Amino acid sequence: MMRGHCILSHGFESGPDATKVAALAEAAERMGWTHERPDYTDLDARRDISSLGDVPTRLVRLHEIATAAAARGPVVLAGSSLGAYIAGRISLQVPTRGLFLMAPPINMGPLPDLDAAAVPVSIIHGWDDELIPAQQVVDWAHMRRARLLLVNDSHRLSDHVVASAEAFAQLLAEL
């Protein structure tokens, strides 16, 4: 029996076959959830919009995908870095059962700060993240009483792919 659908958003200048989102996809399958991994690489290449590509169109794309999925059943949004940011923002607009955020940016310059629906949230973040200070994530998680796993790693969380997948599976098991 399928429990619901997971939408796994890759980070900036990454891709849908990236190691972390691929590991989350495997975890979702093991837990009986369907999944998809949208491709935002075309938008990330649009440097004329901002140094982070076309974030507004990334938000629109995820909104469309999540809205269609939510019409079919429960949805969990997950993402890495910029993917985590858009997952949080879209959870405010589309019915979402849970959120899994890897290295989430709390402040995005001229864009609104990270916000998320009042749903179960699980976060994994590196103590040594060179782009997003761990304390910002701790403070954000504290306000929401989110589950937070801080690990000895950098922004890419490359030493904690398995730990990320395990934390995601734990979130799915609790939904």
Image (spheres, grey):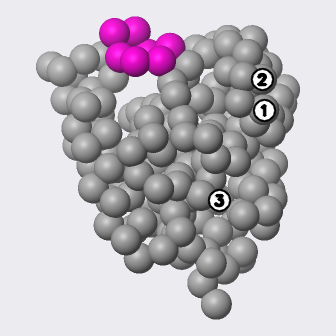
Residue appearing at x 45%, y 40% in the figure: 92
Q: Are marks 2 and 1 in contact (CB under 8 Å)?
A: yes
Image quarter in which the N terminus is found: bottom right
Q: Is residue 53 above or below residue 6?
A: above
Q: Specify the quadrant of the image occupied by residue 144.
A: top right
Amino acid type at circle 2 is His
Determine the CA span between mark 1 and mark 3: 25 Å
Residue appearing at x 44%, y 35% in the figure: 89
Q: Foreground mark, 1 or 3?
A: 1
Question: In x, y percent, where is residue 166?
Answer: 80, 56
Is 142 positioned to the left or the right of 96 in the image? right
Q: Is residue 53 above or below residue 15?
A: above
Please state the extent of the stretch shown in magenta in the rendering. Answer: 107-113
Q: Earlier in the sequence, mark 1 or mark 3?
A: 3
Q: Main secondary structure of the magenta part?
A: loop
**Circle 1 SS class:** loop
Dot 2 alpha-carbon crowd within 10 angstroms: few under 14, some 14 to 19, many 20 or more: few
Question: In x, y percent, where is residue 62?
Answer: 34, 49
Determine the CA span between mark 2 and mark 1: 5 Å
Amino acid type at circle 1 is Arg
**Residue marked by disc 1:** 145
**Circle 3 SS class:** helix
Question: Is residue 64 found inside the magenta-colored segment of the image?
Answer: no
**Residue marked by disc 2:** 142
Q: Which mark is residue 23?
A: 3
Q: Foreground mark, 3 or 2?
A: 2
Is 85 positioned to the left or the right of 100 in the image? left
Determine the CA span between mark 3 and mark 2: 27 Å
Q: Are marks 3 and 2 in contact (CB under 8 Å)?
A: no
Q: Earlier in the sequence, mark 3 or mark 2?
A: 3
Residue 118 seen in render: yes
Question: In x, y percent, where is residue 155?
Answer: 64, 25
